[in-house]
Amino acid sequence: MLNLLVNPIAGGKRGKRMIKNLSRIEGRLNKLGVAYTVYKTEKRGDATEITKKIIADGADNVIVVGGDGTLHEVINGFSDFERVTLGIIPCGTGNDFATSLKIPEDPIKALDIILKNTPAFVDYMQMPTVRGLNIVGMGIDVEVLKLYEECKIKTKITYTKCLLKALLGFKCVQFDASFDGGEPQRYSSFTACIANGYRYGGGIPICPVADPTDKQMDFVVVSGMGKLKTAAAVVKLKAGKILSVKESTHGNMKTVTVTPATEHYTVNVDGELYEDIPFSVTLVSDTLRVFLK
């Protein structure tokens, strides 16, 4: 029995894209005689509650049919990791985490991975109050998301436009960060990014070398610079070359604690914004099982 957790409006076009994708998925399952149940979300937070309920009722899998936002909600409702496996059929606008796992965007190809392959361990990030699968960060990405939320039409192009707009008046964030229990280091940066997956924002490769199966997190900081250099850095960011910028600092670790210089701050976890949460991240490996190629 497959438990399909569906976000009906994932992928945009007011749900038309999901109707088509879900029809294809159900047609494939019906043809193969595979039993399944569809659970549809209606509002933000539903995926977390549905995940909790179906696992409590004995489900041994949760198959996400949606995007990064739905995945984020599901991992925050996940439990009983030894028994329950996560499946991903990417149907969102960006599908950044699925791409990091090399899961194809074609829903039938993604479904066939679930039907034919055995699950493998995938890392996730545990914070005191929330889990993340893809990216945890603060700085310019937060400002971009705030602008993006105000847009009526949400596409990859829209996100890029919000990024450029955010850069115009953005000031670097000040924070201390300690890694694997080491001494805190002071940073002034336009981003503080902890990466499990390698991209965000529908395809922006913030850390091209990040791998959700390598049992380590990647920390990326781009130190403060003038507007011209910042614009040049954004070009390299879009091209997947941000780590080549001399103002970039990159490292690997299993734990990170960030202490912002301001009392109030916003943290981006998988594209969701959280206010003033404890910014401490621990990588969890050999626990979450996901159907992979």
Image (cartoon, rainbow, N blue to C red):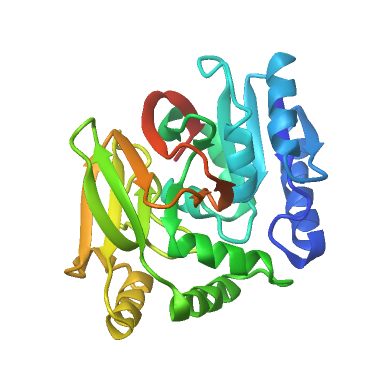
Q: Residue furthest front?
A: 263
Residue 41 at what x, y percent from top left?
Answer: 79, 42
Find residue 105 and report its image quarter.
bottom right
Which residue corresponds to the image point at 60% horizontal and 69% vertical from the top-left?
147
Whether residue 150 appears in this view of the structure is yes
Which residue corresponds to the image point at 44% horizontal and 73% vertical from the top-left?
170
Compared across the picture, whether 286 is left or right of 141 comes to left
Residue 18 at what x, y percent from top left?
Answer: 75, 55
Residue 52 at what x, y percent from top left?
Answer: 69, 24
Q: In this view of the protein, which residue sits in the foreground, 255 or 94?
A: 255
Q: For the C terminus, which image quadrant? A: top left
Q: In this view of the protein, which residue sits in the foreground, 169 or 118?
A: 169
Q: Residue furthest bottom?
A: 228
Residue 184 at what x, y percent from top left?
Answer: 22, 41
Find residue 253 and report its image quarter.
top left
Find residue 49 and report its image quarter.
top right
Which residue corresponds to the image point at 51% horizontal and 60% vertical from the top-left?
142
Compared across the picture, whether 12 is left or right of 143 comes to right
